[in-house]
Image: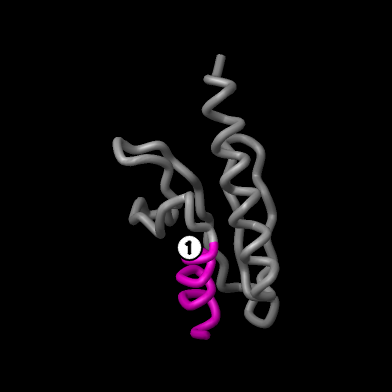
Amino acid sequence: MPDQPREHTRTYFLGKLAQELEARGLDVTLRAHPPALRVSDPDTALLAETVDCVPLSDGWFYRWSWGEIVGLADDPGLAAHRIARVLTGR
């Protein structure tokens, strides 16, 4: 059985990131198992990325699908800026 407090924390941080991404005009869908966000630019829907959230020794971090860290989960605004820049060039 999955660690429920960990899954709640992951979903909480992903929800914060989703709000920031939607405020930047991106389409966001939360995948339930395992929790992750599918993010795309509505103008170029073929360009999409999956972002998850993982606990590391220094805290919780957002992570690209290929494993590179996007940013600290405590700063969803900065992570959203980085994701939007990659997906939209803005």
**Callout 1: helix, strand or loop?**
helix
The quarter in which the N terminus is drawn is top right
- Residue segment shown in magenta: 77-90
Q: Residue at x 69, y 55 (%)?
A: 29
**Residue furthest out toward the front:** 74
Between 72 and 62, the one nearer to me in the picture: 72
Between 64 and 82, the one nearer to me in the picture: 82
**Above or below — where is 33 with respect to 28?**
above
Other-residue count near label 1 (Cα within 10 Å), few / some / many at <14 / 14–19 / ≥20? many
Q: Amino acid at mark 1?
A: Ala
Residue 44 rendering spot, x and y as whole percentages: 63, 80
In the picture of the structure, the residue carrying the numbered disc 1 is 79
Give the dominant element type of the magenta stretch: helix, strand or loop: helix
Q: Residue at x 61, y 35 (%)?
A: 33
Residue 76 rendering spot, x and y as whole percentages: 53, 58
Q: Residue at x 59, y 21 (%)?
A: 4
Residue 65 rendering spot, x and y as whole percentages: 44, 53
Q: Residue at x 69, y 67 (%)?
A: 22
